Amino acid sequence: MAEVTYEHVTKRFAEDAPLAVDDFDLKVADQEFLVLVGPSGCGKSTTLRLLAGLEEITEGNIYIEDRLVNDVQAKDRDIAMVFQSYALYPHMSVFDNMAFGLTLRKIPKDEIRQRVNEAAEILGIAELLKRKPRALSGGQRQRVALGRAIVRKPSVFLFDEPLSNLDAKLRVQTRAEIIKLHQSLGTTFVYVTHDQTEAMTMATRIVVMDRGRIQQVGSPQELYERPQNMFVAGFIGSPAMNFFDVVVEGDGDDLQLRAVEGFAVPVPPEKRAELATYKRRKVVMGIRPENIHDNDFQPPNIRASLVDAQVDVTEMMGNEVNVYLLVGGHAFLARVDSRTTARPGQNIRAAFDIDRLHLFDPDTEQMIGLPAEVRASAPPAESS
Amino acid sequence: MIGRAWWIPWLWLAPTLALLGVFLVYPSVDTVRRSFLDERSREFVGFDNYQTIIDNPNSLAADTHAALLNNMLWLTVFTAVCVGLGLIMAVMTARVRYEAAAKAAIFVPMAISFVAVAVIWRFMYEVDPDVGTVNAIFSELGKDPVAWLNNTQSPQRPFVDLPPADSPAPFQVNNFALIAVGVWNWTGFTLVILSAGLKSIPDDVMEAARVDGAGEWQIFRRIILPIMSPTIVVVTTTLVIQTLKTFDLVFVMTNGRFKTDVVATLFYKEAFVFRDFGVGAALAVVLLLFVVPIMVLTIRRFQFQEEIR
C-alpha cells in the first residue's frame, strides 16, 4: 500500500540516443490500478523498469510513499513485478519459485509455507506446487508468476505486459482475475500493455504514451470520450477512429465541415464557438466506427448527418457488422447493426452521429477547444 | 517400417562401424591383450605388469607412483582452477563493454598448439632473468630466480623464505608450474563455454530475482550457478578427460624429469623408450579405466537432459 510519485523523470540510454522517457511527471494514488499504454518503443516499459529499479534514472526523482528511491536497489524497493516471459526460475519447483523472495527475507519456514499455500489456493495452482516450470502450460506459468508476486505482499505491484504470451481466451480470463486480485489486495498496481483493450478494461486510470512522452492521463471513459490529441484518439478505441480532412465552411447556424471527398457535415451548436477561429481553414474530423450507422437501422435519439458511401468489404462480427466504406476514394470503417443489408459493391447511406465528432487542429494535432492550460502542460499531473 | 529389410540400417552404419572397429576397438582390445603379455608381447605373464605398476620397483627410471599422483594433482587442481577462473571471468566479462576483446584475448592460447605453448613457456620459465619473463618479474620484486621446471620443493617455496625441504609428492613447484601453463592454455575454453551458458540465462530471470530481493551474490549462487550446472558439468568432464590424457605439455617441457611424469608420458616412455610394451600397455589400460567411468557419466547426463527437454 503506497503511492508512487514520478517527478519529471527522464531516461536516456546513451549520450546520443533520443530520450526513452521524456519528462514523465505523475502521481500514482494508493490502491490505484494505473495502466501505461502505448505502441512498442513508446517508453512505457522503461517507465515501469525505472520504478522497479532495473534501470537508472537520468534526471528527475521517483518516490515510493515518501521515500526517494532513485538510488535504492531493486531488491530494497519492496515491489513485486510480473514479467511478460514470466521469468520463473527454471531450476526451482513452483513452491520454491514462490517462496524465493520470502526465503531471502529470512521469513520463518512455517509462515512461508502458509503464505505460498494461501496464494496457490487463490490462483488455483495448489496441486502444481511440486512441479518444475517447464512442466506447466503458459497459463499455469503465468499464475505462478502472479503467485510469486502476491506472496511477497509488496507495497506496489508492477506488471510488464503479463498477458501478451497467453492465447486470446486465457487472456480474457486472466484479465478478469487480475482485476479481482486488485480489488481483494487493495495494493497499488502499475501495469504496462500495448493493448488498449486491456488498458480500457482494467485501469482505474490510463496513461497513454508515445515517443517517451505522456500524451494523456485519464480514466478509460475520459480517454474514450475526450481524447486530447489525434494520437490518443487513434490509439484508444477498437477499431480505431476514422479521420477526415475537412474545411470549416459557412457561418452562424450554417457552419459545416466540408470534407475533401465532397460530403458535408453540419457542426453541432456546442462546437461552433470552438471553431470560431478556424473559419475557412482545414481541420481534422475524427469519428469512431461505432458512431457511424446504417441509416436504415439508426439508433433512436441521435443527430445524424447522412453520407452516401460505397461498400468495399463487410465483416460479420455477430452482434455487429464492420463495414469498410469508400467515399471519394477515402476508406473508412463503420460498425453497424447486424441487420444491415449492405453488400460489397453497393451504395449505402451512412449516418454520422454528429454529437460524437472529434475535431483536431491539423498542425498541432491537438483537440480543438482544449483548455489552454491543459494544452500548455500536455500531461495534466494531479500532483501540480 | 513397412517394406524395409532389417539390414538396411546396418548398411548405413557399416562405414562408421568399420572405422571405429579398425581404429578404436581393435587397438583397445589389443592394448588390453598386450598388458597381460611380456615386454615383447610373446608370453603370457598374467597380472605381472600391473604388479610392476603397484610395486614401483624402479622408481628413478619410471616412477609409476609419482606419475599416478601427479595425474591426480592435474585432475583436481587444473580442473578446479580452470572451471573456477572461467566462471569468474565469464561473469565478469559479461559486465564490461569490451567483453568481446577480453574473451578473445583469453581464448587466443587455445589456438596455439600444445607443443608451441610448451616451447613458449620454457622460455617464460627460464632461470636466467634476462631470458625468463617470470624470473625477470621475480628479480624485479627482489627475489631470487627460481628454476621453475626443476624445483621439486613445496609450492610456496618461491614466495616465502623457508628452509629448503622437499614436500610430499606431488606437491612440487614444478608440477604447479606445469599446471599453470595448462590453465593458461585452457581457461579460454572454459570461459567461452561457460559464458555461452551464462548468456542463455534470460535477463528477466535475473531481474525477477533482483526484484524478489536477491543481491548480486545471491543471484550468482541461487540462480546463475544452479541454472548453469549442466554446462559446468560438461566443461568439468571435458577437462577431467583432458587432464587424464595430459602428455604433450609435460613431454616437451620436462619430459617427465624432476618427478613431473604423468601416466601418459610414462606409458610412452615404458613402451617406446624402455621398450617394455607390457608395462606400457598396462599403464594405458589403467588410464582407460579412469576415463571410462567419466565418459559413462557424461553420456548418461546427456541422455538425461534429452529426456527432460
Image (spheres, coloured by chain):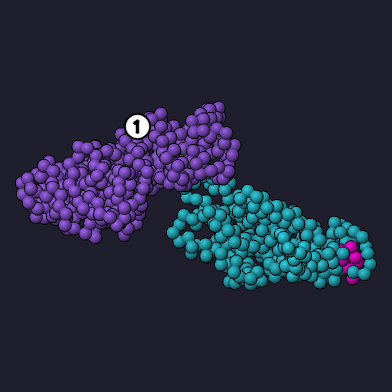
Q: Where residue B194 appears, x then y in whole percent?
A: 57, 56
Tell me what hue chain B is rendered in.
cyan
Q: Residue furthest left?
A: A252
Q: Where residue B165 appears, x then y in whole percent?
A: 72, 55
Q: Measuring 25% from the left and 54% from the top, which residue is drawn there?
A: A347
Instruction: Give left or right: position of B112 versus B98.
Output: right
Q: Measuring 65% from the left and 69% from the top, which residue is drawn there?
A: B114
Chain hosting mark 1:
A
Q: Quadrant of residue B152?
A: bottom right
Q: Where residue A134 appears, x then y in whole percent?
A: 56, 45
Decide whether residue B35 is among the magenta residues.
yes
Estimate how packed mark 1 is, as few (under 14), some (14 to 19) or many (20 or more) residues with alpha carbons within 10 Å. many
The dominant secondary structure in magenta is loop
Q: Measuring 72% from the left and 67% from the top, which residue is drawn there?
A: B12
Decide whether residue B99 is among the magenta residues.
no
Q: Is residue A239 visible?
A: no
Which of these two is toward me, A299 or A3?
A299
Q: Establish if B34 lies above or below A247.
A: below
Quick one: which chain is purple? A
Residue interval drawn in magenta: B34-40
Instruction: Give left or right: position of B73 versus B227.
Output: right
Q: Quadrant of residue A325?
A: bottom left
Which of these two is toward me, B267 or B29?
B29
Q: Amino acid at mark 1?
A: Gln
Q: Measuring 13% from the left and 43% from the top, which residue is drawn there?
A: A268
Which of these two is toward me, A291 or B193?
A291
Q: Is residue B82 visible?
A: yes
* Residue holding disc 1: A31
Q: Establish if B276 lies above or below A62.
A: below
Q: Quadrant of the N terminus of chain A?
A: top left
Q: Quadrant of the C terminus of chain A?
A: top left
